[in-house]
């Protein structure tokens, strides 16, 4: 992707009044067609995003006003009726095409994701692969997930029940910055397939990736107004909740609680994918050759800014020292880099705020007596927000990183004497998003998994197979969320059931009404007999 140099022209029709256009990293011809897709009006303001690799201004992105949110949801609602009326296969054709296009045009979005979030290209590619996977899964399975269901009625022979699924209408998606493409589209795909419109509010730092997703949906053939992007911060997110029929939020637990309260006031559904303090247990019988590289990915993918990242490393004492002897040098050997290529293992943190949070957690733990086995340094030699992958030992219970989510490349070691203690330690948190167990005895690992209080547990992997299993529900227990993304549950979240119950014998005079007309205790006696017979016949 081309970048701008000193003296290049203006940023299309979007000008940050505080900065000459020549100082932006991204070329105007790349930014202008994207920012034209923001629902905005004159005077709503501009957000200046930053290139995390250097701290330089990346682009000026127009913001939306609360009135723009009202306009976007109104237009989405109008477009949604015709969209829902289309046969499913026509909606599926658009989403199938999206899955093809995202792979074809991956180099554009890989650049954009890296430049907006600071992540390594390998981690950016996981987002591309995820969307191709999500499209394929839902295109293949939507018919099954949306199919009408026949159910037994009040009086089996006399009552016929069909349960239909109807789209809720307009789904609002509020997303953070850490997976700009995945979180723009992974809930959009099932929502659109189910016949909804979508209005997305991305994080201000990663709006361009969301706008690229909007461009791709248009190219895939999505009619106008069915997917809109509103840009802004908390105020625009809150406004969106006030105008949609379901909100799908990904972000911090603190914000999730506010959104749930607002959705509750409006009696709309909310799916909340929130934070985690995910444990990873290496059992005594784990294959360390496989575990060491796997645990590296589990802890340091996306520089730890991944909701499913492992921040608590629970080691069986029989293998703890052997594991650390191999793990610590492997962490030290991870390469950090800013290239728009596949050379670096680990990228940058996204911002100064994120650096402050991560460094704050590490400094706090060290001050309270923890030891750094590796890392614990700000790598300003690579870029302003780079932080070295860090392994902490002897972290005291009152250290912030013991229980709070760090959301960075920091993992704390705990040693345990056996599986029971491991389960206790894994569950010792108010979060419940994800856990990982490493053992050569998969059956035993499954039994342990059943005792862990998290929405997903993966055996002999960090997170990739859990996230990548698009058919399997994914989400959090406890303070990690409400509802699930992926699979049937994703479709159920954005549809309402409608039960149509028909009396079959009505025209023939065989109905409850006809029975009631017999008067006296006859109806009760007949119904008592019918209920007894239905029980004896084991009718559901
Ligand atoms: P955040 O909660 O601060 O912000 C997330 C989004 O919500 C942003 O778009 C923000 O503008 C918006 N927002 C903030 N306040 C709002 C309000 N009052 N009303 C409506 N919208 C509001 O989260 P963050 O710090 O940007 O993201 C990191 C967090 O996201 C971490 O806790 C991480 O674990 C979580 N996360 C969870 C998952 C998951 O699937 N469980 C995935 C990725 C990230």
Image (spheres, helix red, strand yellow):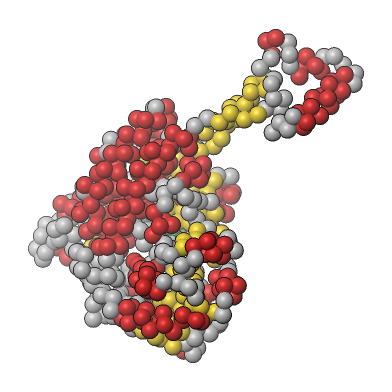
The residue drawn where x is 87% and y is 19% is 522
Looking at the picture, tell me which residue is in the foreground, 123 or 249: 123
Q: Is residue 434 above or below residue 190?
A: below
Q: Residue at x 59, y 75 (%)?
A: 421
Say how many tags the image has: 0
**From where the camera sits, is residue 399 visible?**
no
Q: Residue at x 23, y 81 (%)?
A: 381
Q: Is residue 135 above or below residue 370?
A: above
Q: Is residue 314 left or right of residue 60?
A: right
The vertical placement of 3 against 428, above or below, is above
Query: Is residue 262 visible from the viewing direction of this image?
Result: yes
Query: Residue 16 falls in which quadrant of the image?
Result: bottom left
Residue at 47% across, 68% down = 439
Quadrant of the picture in which ligand 1 is shown? bottom left
| Left or right of 33 in this view: 421 | right
- Across and down, in percent, residue 537 comes to 74, 29
Where's residue 412, x and y in %?
46, 79
Q: Quadrant of the N terminus?
A: bottom left
Q: Nearer the viewer, residue 428 or 269?
A: 428
Which quadrant would the C terminus be assigned to in this image? top right
Q: Position of residue 142 (x, y in %)?
A: 43, 37
Residue farthest to the top, as pictured: 508
Position of residue 52 measured from the top left corner of the image (x, y, whole percent): 27, 68
Outermost residue on the right side: it is 520
């Amino acid at each position: 992707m081309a970048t701008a140099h000193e003296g290049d022209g203006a940023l299309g029709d979007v000008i940050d009044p505080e900065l000459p256009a020549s100082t932006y990293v991204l070329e105007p011809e790349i930014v202008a067609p994207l920012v034209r897709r923001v629902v905005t009006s004159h005077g709503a303001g501009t957000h200046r995003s930053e290139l995390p690799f250097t701290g330089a201004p990346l682009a000026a992105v127009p913001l939306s006003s609360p009135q723009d949110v009202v306009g976007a949801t109104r237009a989405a609602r109008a477009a949604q009726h015709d969209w829902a009326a289309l046969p499913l296969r026509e909606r599926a054709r658009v989403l199938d095409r999206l899955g093809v296009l995202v792979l074809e045009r991956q180099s554009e979005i890989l650049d954009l994701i890296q430049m907006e979030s600071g992540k390594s290209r390998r981690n950016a590619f996981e987002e591309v692969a995820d969307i191709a996977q999500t499209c394929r899964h839902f295109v293949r399975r939507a018919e099954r997930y949306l199919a009408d269901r026949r159910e037994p009625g009040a009086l089996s022979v006399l009552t016929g029940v069909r349960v239909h699924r109807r789209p809720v209408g307009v789904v609002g998606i509020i997303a953070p910055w850490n997976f700009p493409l995945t979180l723009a589209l992974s809930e959009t795909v099932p929502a659109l397939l189910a016949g909804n419109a979508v209005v997305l509010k991305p994080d201000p730092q990663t709006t361009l990736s969301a706008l690229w997703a909007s461009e791709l949906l248009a190219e895939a053939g999505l009619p106008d107004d069915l997917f809109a992007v509103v840009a802004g911060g908390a105020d625009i997110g809150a406004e969106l909740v006030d105008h949609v029929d379901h909100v799908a939020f990904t972000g911090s637990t603190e914000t999730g609680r506010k959104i749930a309260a607002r959705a509750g006031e409006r009696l709309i559904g909310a799916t909340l994918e929130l934070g985690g303090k995910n444990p990873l247990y290496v059992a005594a019988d784990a294959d360390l050759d496989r575990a060491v590289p796997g645990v590296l990915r589990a802890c340091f993918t996306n520089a730890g800014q991944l909701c499913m990242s492992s921040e608590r490393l629970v080691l069986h004492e029989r293998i703890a020292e052997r594991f650390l002897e191999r793990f610590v040098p492997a962490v030290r050997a991870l390469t950090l880099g800013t290239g728009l290529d596949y050379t670096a293992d680990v990228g940058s943190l996204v911002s100064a705020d994120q650096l402050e949070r991560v460094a704050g957690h590490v400094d706090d733990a060290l001050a309270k007596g923890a030891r750094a086995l590796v890392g614990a340094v700000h790598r300003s030699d690579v870029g302003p927000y780079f932080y070295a992958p860090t392994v902490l030992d002897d972290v005291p219970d009152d250290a912030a990183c013991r229980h709070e989510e760090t959301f960075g490349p920091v993992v704390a070691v705990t040693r345990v004497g056996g599986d029971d203690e491991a389960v206790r330690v894994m569950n010792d948190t108010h979060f419940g998003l994800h856990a990982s167990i490493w053992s050569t005895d998969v059956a035993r690992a499954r039994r342990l998994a059943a005792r862990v209080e998290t929405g997903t547990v993966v055996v002999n992997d960090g997170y990739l197979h859990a996230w990548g299993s698009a058919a399997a529900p994914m989400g959090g227990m406890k303070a990690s969320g409400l509802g699930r993304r992926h699979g049937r549950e994703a479709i159920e979240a954005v549809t309402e059931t409608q039960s149509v119950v028909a009396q079959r014998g009505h025209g023939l005079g065989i109905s409850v009404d006809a029975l009631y007309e017999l008067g006296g205790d006859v109806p009760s006696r007949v119904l008592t007999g019918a209920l007894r017979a239905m029980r004896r016949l084991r009718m559901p």
